[in-house]
Amino acid sequence: MTLPSGMVSAVYRETGVPSYQGNPFIEALPPILERKQLRDGLGGTIELRPADIYLDGETRIHIISHLLDGFFQPLARHVELESKISIILRQGYVGRNLATGDLSTHIRNGYERIMQGNLSAVLDDPSDRRSARNALTARPRSLMQIPPAGDNPNRH
């Protein structure tokens, strides 16, 4: 089958995480990066020509400015942020697994509860209320740590 322009065929990969196994949304994502892969992908390079040190000061300022524009030093917080985004993305798809049919059951049950006017009703097997089919697909996560508000004991 020929794909429309701009479309690509999905490549499904094993993730190594049991809760992600068999989920086509997750298995079609790029692989989970190792720290070294991430650092190599984020890190920038600069090209310094030895002859540049002999140029006049004004010209060197422009060259240095250009070098700084192309330079990026990944820090621990960048690695942590990538990891959190990867987890949030994949965890969001756990409850949306098309292969199991749980999502359509969950949506159908939600619709029935709304139509009955009783949002607390359980239309599935009550003993299975905490199952994957009723799992939230959006979980609260913090991407950035916000320092606590209030007086700083180190301030004088």
Image (spheres, rainbow, N blue to C red):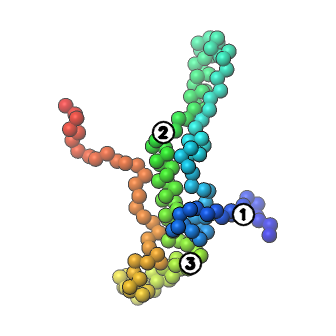
Residue indicated by mark 3: 100
Distance between mark 1 and mark 2 Cα atoms: 34 Å
Q: Is residue 153 above or below residue 83?
A: above
Q: Is residue 5 above or below residue 67?
A: below
Could you classify mark 3 by the number of other residues whose Cα lies within 10 Å: few (under 14), some (14-19), or many (20 or more)? some
Residue 64 screen position, x and y as percent = 58, 22
Residue 94 numbered mark, or none: none
Q: Is label 1 in a helix, a strand or a loop? A: loop
Q: Residue at x 68, y 63 (%)?
A: 10
The answer to whether any part of residue 117 appears in the image is no
The residue type indicated by label 1 comes to: Ser
Could you classify mark 2 by the number of other residues whose Cα lies within 10 Å: few (under 14), some (14-19), or many (20 or more)? few
Decide which of tag 3 and tag 1 comes sooner along the chain: 1
Residue 43 screen position, x and y as percent = 58, 38
Q: Residue at x 58, y 64 (%)?
A: 26
Residue 63 screen position, x and y as percent = 62, 22
Residue 102 screen position, x and y as percent = 52, 78
The residue type indicated by label 2 comes to: Leu
The residue lying toward the viewer, choosing from 20 and 141, is: 20
Q: Are marks 3 and 1 in contact (CB under 8 Å)?
A: no
Q: Is label 2 in a helix, a strand or a loop? A: loop
Q: Would you say 50 lies left or right of 105 here? A: right
Residue indicated by mark 2: 75
Q: Residue at x 55, y 72 (%)?
A: 97
The residue lying toward the viewer, choosing from 149 and 33, is: 33
The residue type indicated by label 3 comes to: Thr
Residue indicated by mark 1: 9
The answer to whether any part of residue 141 appears in the image is yes
Image quadrant of residue 39?
Answer: top right
Quadrant occupied by the N terminus: bottom right
Q: Residue at x 52, y 56 (%)?
A: 86
